[in-house]
Image (cartoon, helix red, strand yellow):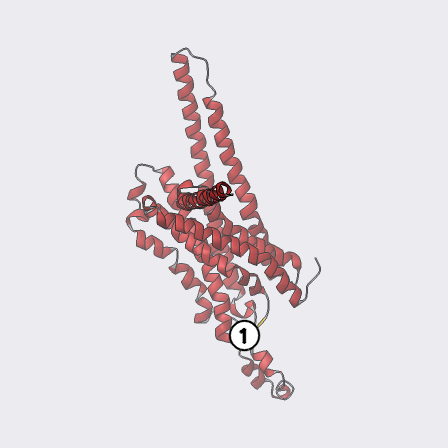
Amino acid sequence: MDPLDEPSREKLIFYLTVPLSSIIILSNLFIIVGIACNRQLHNTPNYFFLSLLVADLCTGITLPFIPRMALDRQLDFKHCLVMYIFPNFLFLSFLFNLVMVHYERYLCIVSPLHHSQFWVHRCFPLALLTVWLPPLLYASLPAFGWNNWVEPNANKSSNPNKMQSTVGNSSKVDEVCTYKQVFPKAFIYLEVCGLVLPAMLSIMGMTGRVLWIAHKQLQNICKLHRAVDRLQQQQPTDHEQQLNLRYAKCVAAVSLTFLVCWVPYIIYQLMSVTALQSGVSLPSSSLYIIMSCTGIGSMAIIPLILGLANKQYTEPIRRVIHKLRNRWRGGQNNRDITL
């Protein structure tokens, strides 16, 4: 697509991220209130999921600012660090929380009788610390010196002949802030290849393993049903077909979630790494802006799919909505009777 000027880029980012961010924020608040109001959900697995929802909520708040990280800004060094470090920390913490939730549920399925003995349940504060502290430490590395920031004053002192020509626009030069000054190439490569990619592969691996276990258990259940039908000399029932249909729906839901939530983010990462290697400036491209907004936004939808699919999380809110609807209908009926 054709490159866009700065006002057009700002408008495109606004129209893409603000509606998506609003949906993510409201949906997370909806599920958080549902978990907080239901005392039966106050246990370790749901505490991990609640931590994921908080991280997803923060990601939704910072979503309009993440695509702007590829744009140049007029900021000093301290504000420039905050602008880039804080959204990066929130996204990494969201990714770590997502891995932890999948890992905890994976342990419950693989070892249903002994999952409470694993360190994730026995040392819950430590497990919760591992999903927030490492992202904070890694994202803060540019603040501790791992950056490409060059003071403009140093460049001026090394070029005395050009000092007079740059005095008029020195204030503008001092305030230019780009992601290349904050994040070195090694930092970006390490984050993508050492943190993001292993996290994605681990989630996909655990999901595939769970589907394989479910398939094996389904086969065993079907064999038992056939054996019982043979002993009782009965005709085969449609229960086996229902189980296969339910498993097929589960596989289709997982595949659709992967296509909708993961594929846009993978394409966005490939475009970013390719642009970084070739030195091409893609932030001015409307395609790159669209993929960055939809890629991060689609990742943030994953906890919402997990939360809204669980009726226990949404039961308190649905009760409140049901009561309000009944009161509204009752008020309308009273008005009709009065008329």
Residue 125, compared with residue 326, is above or below; it is: below
Horizontal side, residue 185 vs residue 102: left or right:
right
Please give the name of the residue rendered at 55% of the width and 54% of the height, measured from the top-left corner. 20
> What percent of the width, then of the height, locates residue 141?
44, 67
Q: Tell whether 173 sits left or right of 246.
A: right
Question: What residue do we see at 43% from left, 18% from top?
Answer: 226
Considering depth in this image, is 32 or 12 the residue closer to the camera? 32
Write the residue at 46% across / 23% down: 240
Q: Is residue 283 visible?
A: no
Q: Secondary structure at mark 1?
A: loop
Outermost residue, right side: 2
Read off the residue under disc 1: 75
Measured as percent of width and height from the top left, residue 211 is found at: 46, 36
Q: Which residue ends up furthest to the front in the rendered image?
A: 339
Q: Please give left or right for residue 284 compared with residue 79 in the image.
A: right
Residue 223: tell me if it is visible: yes
